[in-house]
Image (cartoon, helix red, strand yellow):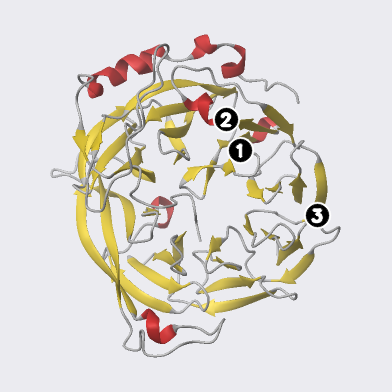
Amino acid sequence: MSRPNMAPAAAGALVLLLALGASAQYVGPATQRVAGRARLFVADNSPAAPAIVVIDLPSFNVSQRIQTPGTTSSLGVSQEQAHLGVFRNRDNDQQTLTIVSTGIRPPYPVGGVRLPNPAPLADGELGAMRPALLAKSFIFVNGSDGIGGVEGGRQLTYHSGWKRYMAYAENHGHIFLYRSDHLHGATAFKPTHTFKIPVGHFHVLPYGNHIVAPHTGTQMAYILDAKGKTVRSYACAACHGASVYVPSESGKVAVFGCNGTVLVVKGTSATGIHVPAFPPRVGSFTNGVPGVFWSASSSQAFFWRTDVRSDTPTVTSVPHRGAAIRMLALPGGLGHFAALHLDGSLVLYDGDTGAADASIELRAQGFANMTAPSLQSEADGSAIYVAVSSLRAPAPALAVSSLGEIHRIAVTHTEGEGEGDHDHAEGEPHHDEEGSVALVLESSLTVGGFPTSMTLAYMPGVVKNPDHSH
């Protein structure tokens, strides 16, 4: 594989030591500890003072603000919950990757013996965390580019079969593979492999033993193997958005959003199936129940529902209240997805039928489409976080100030009356046992600025499998 043409691989000296110095004010003594079970990290893209806001849970208090010059496009946590990767754009000519130590695991030492990882927490135990700190920041690629490496706005994109993280630079046409030890502040960032793909707007997702890449620029959908070889390519007009269903390696299915169709590819078959879906074109996909994907745009009053569980894939429309501006799959096997609507409502939908199961009004005056809030959830689906950037004019109205808020909405469940009364045949739905679901606003927190992307890092034992989305 070719070495990436990027600054971190060429010279570790490009690490921005200034940023390290700036973070020192938040660290405090080495013995300092904070009680908690998890941390919510929020990107604040305030023009004057961009930062990563650290919110400790369950107290739901802002404990730190770590300055990160430049606009954050996405952020995600590592598999071991020890590091936060922040992909940033600085003055549109330097694409920067910043690594923040979450404080949940001991730091990686330059020399000597590394401290043992904390033991898994018992039920109800909070545990102790160190303050988060900026571990390193470096130029990912030079020049104007779109970079990324976060899957679904939750975790750093990770291929479990290859044991590698993945990141990409669109205008360089590069896909980088790297290991978890490259995230440590004491080590240089050196990708193990560099795959080449046509320059242009694309994204990357793991797909069993392969990866998929929808490419808007070439209007193609690609499947690559572990050596970076393009094993299949498919015509996909205005190709944007993809998702995968991998019940097994032999039964895996990929879907791509095209202009007027949804492209469905079974395994690595030579031809895909274009299922009509118009208008408008299907863009990004949100997972419902396994094998069912949901899509929407703010201009339509329905979801596109793509079902690939049978031999004949289907795309149907399901009406909703209109103007869905954000969507989020709820993990933890709950079979729901959430959608934020322009009218200010957050709605929980059934991941199979699209029926609205619960809703809550977050803002009576509604939201602005161009500054739509961001969504995130707990790894077990027990709560949803909404980051809202609201503009208000002070009195006298000489300027516009910003006030950002983070809302925590609990997803509560009540047991059905028939639970435990009778058995079900295999595959038969358990609607009488599921009971009802509700959304309850637990708390709101003012953070200031323009909060956007969010992700969570958990202490060991809090959730069984935080990277499992279904």
Q: Are marks 1 and 2 in contact (CB under 8 Å)?
A: yes
> Which residue corresponds to mark 2?
179
Q: Amino acid at mark 2?
A: Arg
> Which residue corresponds to mark 1?
163
Point out the tag, 2 or 3, that comes first from the N-terminus.
2
Q: Is residue 398 left or right of residue 311?
A: left
Disc number for residue 234: 3
Residue 248 in percent (x, y) is at: 68, 60
Q: Residue at x 64, y 44 (%)?
A: 161
Give the position of the N terminus as an image quadrant.
Answer: top right
Element class at badge 2: loop
Please indicate, yes or no, whether residue 3 appears anywhere in the rendered image: yes
User: Image quadrant of residue 100?
Assistant: top left
Point out the tag, 3 or 1, that comes first from the N-terminus.
1
Q: Is residue 158 left or right of residue 365?
A: right
Q: Amino acid at mark 1?
A: Lys
Which mark lies nearer to you, 2 or 3? 2
* Residue reaching furthest to the right: 270
Gap between marks 2 and 3 measured at Cα: 30 Å
Residue 223 in percent (x, y) is at: 75, 48
